[in-house]
Amino acid sequence: MNKNNLNQIFEHYIDRFEYINNEANEEYYKWQVCNQFPMLMKQALSSENELFPKALYEAKKCTFNIIDSYTQPFSGLVDISKHDPDGVRKLLLDLYADDGGDLDVQMEIIADFFKHSNELIDMHYPESFRYRQDSHSVSALLFLNDPDHHYMYKAVQSQRFADCVEFYDDWGTGDNIRIDTYYRMCDELVEEIKNCDPLIKTDSSRFDGRLKLTGGELHPDTEKHILAFDIIYCCSVYDLFDGISYTKRNMKEKQLYLAEKAEAERLKQSCDQAKANMEKLETAWELFIGMLPAGEKIKHPKYGEGAVTYIDNEYIYVKFADKEAQISLSVGLANNLITTDKPGFKEKVAEYREVLKNYKSIQDRMDNSARALKPYEEYLN
């Protein structure tokens, strides 16, 4: 490593520490997530099958945007667990199996995780690209659960940091990088962190009350793995490379980088719109699931009056006088096949009719926009 460049990064991190952790940025939330996540994941993995999806959702929710963004691999695990709790539970238990500190074993575990998670997606959501796992999501699942023994990886930020500190060993690209190489760079970074007294003193202000924080307790981070990732991440996001001389992209590479960044912004706008429509659709599902609980009386233009027996965001099951019917929730609501005299019901159907009517295309656009953005996603940070 180029220790001169690294020391300049440390100096910039110290100088901008309060800004990085102010009310607008709050990057200390990584320490809070690492403190909360292991307990929530343990609770989820030990819960009964019928409670498992909700418990796993609580673990996902606490991660904020660390794993899920325009792609949603953690949400995918939650959704699949509604259909196959045993499969998702085993997938995660296998990922968290003891590797004995052997990175070769860990890489085999990660390769198996990719293989079996793809099998589950192909079985339950075969057209959903946004649920696919990648190197970042898997590293985050490991890191958040045990940050003292793992490191989190983000492709663009990690590569830019490696260029600056002149770590030139290649950990590869794509969804299954060589983590032994990446971990070696992070181990070298941690060693330098622990030898930098001003940095350690600055970091300790996170824990001793000098830095005013909101929210929950922090993971103690005795091994400084969270701090290592925070420095790698902040180098790109808060320009800790400022004024540091290192081998940069040539003009052609720079132009290509800027072009790809512009394309990333364009695709992001498309993905944001698709995401907003998807969120509105999910809000509609949640609303009508609440308004049509089991036992609720509904009317159907063909079957007459019936009672709801079960409902989820895909189907509503109704017992009529002469038959039991399974009706698509979105289609049924959008086309007035499901009506009730409950106050406000008609108004809510009218409010959400457009997204309900187009639920399939909304899901497809979310997947397609996420797929298009995926190769450019790292350029957004």
Image: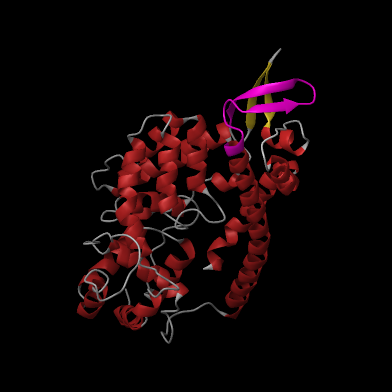
What residue range appears in magenta? 290-311
Quadrant position of residue 30: bottom left
- Residue 299 falls left or right of residue 240: right
Foreground pick, 236 / 320: 320
Query: Percent position (x, y) of residue 360?
Result: 71, 41
Question: Quick one: which residue is furthest to the bottom in this view?
Answer: 243
Q: Residue at x 65, y 46 (%)?
A: 281
Is-magenta flag for residue 304?
yes
Taking the magenta stretch, the answer to whether it contains residue 306 is yes
Which of the 4 image quadrants contains residue 293?
top right
Q: Quadrant of the N terminus?
A: bottom left
- Which x, y percent locates residue 140? 40, 53
- Residue 151 visible (yes or no): no
Identified at 44% across, 31% down, the residue is: 85
Please tell me which residue is depicted at 48% across the width and 38% down the height of the picture: 117
Q: Looking at the image, what colour scheme do you see?
A: secondary structure
* x then y, percent, for residue 212: 31, 73
Q: Nearer the viewer, residue 234 or 275?
A: 275
Place of residue 64 in the rendered image (x, y in percent of width and height, measured from the top left): 45, 56
